[in-house]
Amino acid sequence: MIEVTFDIRDKSLIGFEFSGHAGYAESGKDIVCAGVSSLVLNMINSVEEFCEDKYMLDIDEDMGHVKFSFVDNPSYNAILLINSLELGIKGIEKTYSQHINLNYREV
C-alpha cells in the first residue's frame, strides 16, 4: 500500500511524504504506482521549472519513498501545484482505495 501524508500549516499544504508500493500488479505493470509516481514527479519538476520556491527533497526509489517540503511559505504558483497533486492523488484514492492511504498532518 502507498502511504501518502500531506503536511499542512495555516490551512495550506506545505509538503508531503509518499512511501511504499501499491501492490496492485507486478513491478513494471502497476498502474497505481505509475500514476502516483507520475503525479509526484511532475509536481516536483513543475515547482523546479516554474517557481522560485526553495524546497527540501529526499527520494529513495528502491524503498518507494519521497519526502518534499517547502523551506519557506510557498508562493501562489507553488500552492497551486501542490493542490493539483492532492487533487490527482484523491482521484486515484477514490478508485484504488485498497492500494493507497491518504492522510494529513499539521506541522
Image: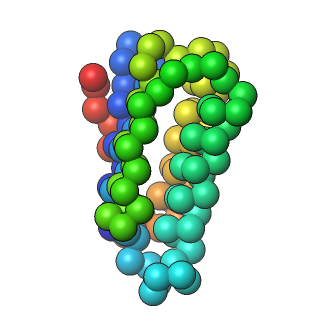
Q: Is residue 102 visible?
A: no
Q: Residue furthest right?
A: 50
- Residue 12 on image: x %, y %: 46, 20
Q: In the rendered view, tell whether residue 37 sits above or below residue 42.
A: below
**Residue at 60% from the left image edge and 25% from the top image edge:** 78
Q: Give the total of numbered labels.
A: 0
Query: Camera-side residue: 1 or 19?
Result: 19
- Residue 55 on image: x %, y %: 47, 27
Rendering colour mode: rainbow
Q: Is residue 90 visible?
A: yes
**Residue at 51% from the left image edge and 69% from the top image edge:** 32
**Residue at 47% from the left image edge and 58% from the top image edge:** 93
**Residue at 51% from the left image edge and 22% from the top image edge:** 54
Q: Quadrant of residue 107?
A: top left
Q: Quadrant of residue 70?
A: top left
- Residue 98 on image: x %, y %: 37, 69
* In-image side of 93 versus 82 (left or right): left
Q: Residue furthest bottom?
A: 26
Q: In the rendered view, tell whether residue 106 sits above or below residue 35.
A: above
Specify the quadrant that holds the N terminus. Answer: bottom left
Q: In the rendered view, tell whether residue 57 sits above or below residue 25.
A: above
Q: In the rendered view, tell whether residue 85 sits above or below residue 8.
A: below
